[in-house]
């Protein structure tokens, strides 16, 4: 997907030359992976001569949005939440009134620090 | 039913009884010391809560081992075998003299039901963790790797930043947040997430969540939530140490929380507001207060040592008491 998103050639042989040889993956594996991604709806393809030419059907952003949606959905249901330590909790929000009070506290502390000890 | 199966039933029943005792003991500790614990330095609090999460399971294993110790000794030194003084109907918790009676059928069915329910829940939880790990791995593989910062940037405008993964945790930051943050805020957030990676918080939290299933429900929920807050606060403290400014960490938490307000609450609804208010409030107020004093875990370790020694010394009495209790509830 990364190869196709960055504008790489979508023919199986080209993907194999770009990735497969370096990673020791056979052309067959590349072909079946591309086919699986096509069947999952992540790629689309055109037949050019005898070969299929693949291209991404979803953008990287849409793909990531879907994955994050799945992750946040999972996080709402117990055990999987532990896998992720978010900077602010993905499933918990402070209300606006709490946030304003806390921001005022931080601003107040900043002012005190800037004035320095008397 | 074979004698070995009857013996296994007794050991299983003893294990469940010890587990229940451990859960009750943990509930009493939480009731007595929970409020005091929440004022501890977050790093020490996190360690203490992890130990507390393990208490029922650890006490079940420890008590079962101690209660079986006389039988294990008899296995090694036949001269110390005391079982022949009991009659055959006695609930022998013994590897040498297997009991001639099993436990009551209704009790056996309940135990099997309990064990199956626990196993089913564990399988569901494990599959959900595996799914989350696969999603995290896919995000890490397809995101933009920034080796200079040690992070992966995920292509979304949502303001997200998290450390994820059990054995090889990674820091993932969304493009939206990366672009929106100032250099100072970015430094705070990355220091915080790197602290999660270093401390292996996701792995500890996963184990603690699994162990929380052995607690009374309200204790388990309290433990999981307190552990999460303690881990966040411990990483806040490390980030504050890293950027040498506690107020900057508090400001960064509020900046990300402010950015997340619209996006996440729109999707998840107002149900989650109450919990989040508490966690963010506690973190920010702690950072605006004085730095926490280092807390020694020595009293806890000494208590644990005394507990282990007492169990070994009283193993014989515990063995007889367990057999007597089992004789009453098993039949």
Image (cartoon, rainbow, N blue to C red):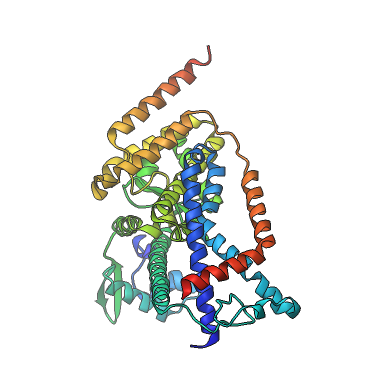
Q: Is residue A53 above or below residue B206?
A: below
Total tally of numbered discs in the picture: 0
Quadrant in the rendering for residue A48: bottom left
User: In the image, residue B137 lies at what x, y percent?
Assistant: 43, 62
User: In the image, residue B70 lies at what x, y percent?
Assistant: 67, 71
Residue sitting nearer the eye, B210 or B216: B216
Residue sitting nearer the eye, B272 or B327: B327
Quadrant in the rendering for residue B320: bottom right
Residue sitting nearer the eye, B73 or B161: B73
User: In the image, residue A54 lies at what x, y percent?
Assistant: 30, 71
Q: Is residue B203 visible?
A: no
Q: Is residue B32 visible?
A: yes
The answer to whether residue B175 is left or right of residue B305 is left
User: In the image, residue B13 lies at what x, y percent?
Assistant: 49, 71
Q: State the residue lying farthest toward the top.
A: A118
Which residue: 29% across, 42% down?
B273
Q: Is residue A83 above or below residue A42?
A: above
Which residue: 26% across, 49% down?
B268
Residue sitting nearer the eye, B22 or B155: B22
């Amino acid at each position: 997907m990364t190869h196709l998103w960055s504008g790489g050639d979508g023919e199986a042989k080209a993907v194999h030359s770009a990735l497969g040889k370096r990673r020791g993956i056979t052309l067959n594996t590349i072909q079946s992976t591309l086919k699986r991604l096509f069947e999952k709806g992540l790629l689309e393809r055109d037949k050019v001569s005898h070969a299929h030419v693949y291209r991404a059907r979803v953008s990287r952003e849409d793909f990531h949005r879907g994955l994050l949606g799945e992750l946040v959905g999972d996080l709402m249901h117990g055990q999987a939440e532990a896998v992720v330590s978010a900077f602010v909790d993905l499933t918990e929000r402070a209300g606006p009134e709490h946030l304003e009070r806390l921001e005022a506290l931080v601003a107040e502390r900043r002012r005190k620090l800037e004035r320095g000890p008397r | 039913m074979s004698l070995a199966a009857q013996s296994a039933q007794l050991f299983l029943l003893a294990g469940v009884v010890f587990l229940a005792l451990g859960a009750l003991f943990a509930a009493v500790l939480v009731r007595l010391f929970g409020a005091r614990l929440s004022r501890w330095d977050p790093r020490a609090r996190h360690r203490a809560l992890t130990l507390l999460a393990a208490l029922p399971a650890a006490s079940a294993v420890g008590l079962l081992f101690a209660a079986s110790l006389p039988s294990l000794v008899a296995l090694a030194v036949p001269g110390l075998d005391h079982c022949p003084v009991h009659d055959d109907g006695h609930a022998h918790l013994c590897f040498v003299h297997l009991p001639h009676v099993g436990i009551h059928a209704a009790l056996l069915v309940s135990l099997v039901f309990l064990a199956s329910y626990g196993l089913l829940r564990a399988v569901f939880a494990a599959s959900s963790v595996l799914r989350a790990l696969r999603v995290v791995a896919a995000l890490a593989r397809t995101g933009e790797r920034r080796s200079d910062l040690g992070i992966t940037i995920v292509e979304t405008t949502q303001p997200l930043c998290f450390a994820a993964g059990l054995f090889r945790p990674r820091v993932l930051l969304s493009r939206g947040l990366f672009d929106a943050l100032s250099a100072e805020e970015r430094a705070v957030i990355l220091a915080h997430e790197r602290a999660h990676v270093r401390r292996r918080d996701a792995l500890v939290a996963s184990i603690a969540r699994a162990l929380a299933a052995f607690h009374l429900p309200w204790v388990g929920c309290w433990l999981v939530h307190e552990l999460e807050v303690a881990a966040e606060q411990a990483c806040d403290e490390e980030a504050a140490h890293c950027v040498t400014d506690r107020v900057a960490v508090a400001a960064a938490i509020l900046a990300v929380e402010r950015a997340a307000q619209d996006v996440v609450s729109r999707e998840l609804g107002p149900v989650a507001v109450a919990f989040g208010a508490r966690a963010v409030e506690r973190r920010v107020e702690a950072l605006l207060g004085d730095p926490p004093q280092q807390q020694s875990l020595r009293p806890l370790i000494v208590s644990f040592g005394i507990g282990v020694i007492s169990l070994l010394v009283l193993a014989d009495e515990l063995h007889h008491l367990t057999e007597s209790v089992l004789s009453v509830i098993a039949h």
